[in-house]
Amino acid sequence: MDFLKMYLLLFSFSSLAYADDLYEIEKRRLFSPTPAELSAEASGRIYIYDGLRDVDIDHAMEHDFRRIEAMMFIRTRKTDQDGEVLKSPETGMNVVEDDGC
């Protein structure tokens, strides 16, 4: 395997790992914010959540609605009844809600 192919393969795996890490960080922040994060929200800071699943957002709305003013959601991934992210049959990409942005 030549260097370029190996680099592209490693880059694609590292990008996937980064996306998974970011998802876990945002999910932790949404469901278990630190005292400092809650303080920032109380003082008017808004956090933009990018790429969460719709079921995660629904759960947050049901259990912690009082924080909604400090949240913005973009590129929300749609899921099926089991919470699995839907894929477009044409492109194979995640199906995301139109957030108007």
Image (cartoon, helix red, strand yellow):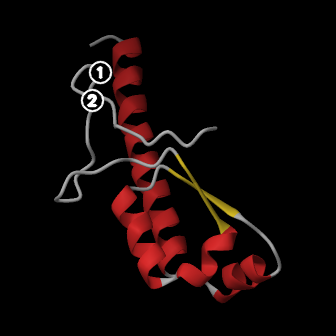
SS at circle 1: loop
Residue 29 visible from this viewpoint: yes
Quadrant for residue 82, please give it: bottom left
Quadrant for residue 44, please give it: bottom right
Where in the figure is residue 5, as x and y percent of width and height? 34, 15
Could you say which is closer to the camera, residue 26 or residue 76? Answer: 76
Quadrant for residue 48, please give it: bottom right
Position of 94 with respect to 11 (left or right) is left
SS at circle 2: loop
Residue for point 62% across, 79% down: 67
Where in the figure is residue 51, as x and y percent of width and height? 47, 49
Q: Which mark is residue 88?
A: 2
Q: Mark 2 near mark 1, Cβ–Cβ under 8 Å? A: yes
Q: Which mark is residue 44?
A: none
Position of the N terminus by quadrant: top left
Q: Is residue 72 above or below residue 87?
A: below
Could you say which is closer to the camera, residue 38 or residue 66? Answer: 66
For badge 1, the amino acid type reads: Thr
Residue on which the image places disc 1 = 91
Residue for point 26% across, 42% down: 86
Position of 1 with respect to 41 (left or right) is left
Residue for point 40% across, 52% down: 20
Q: Distance between the residues labelled 2 and 1?
A: 5 Å
Where in the figure is residue 37, as x and y percent of width and height? 68, 79
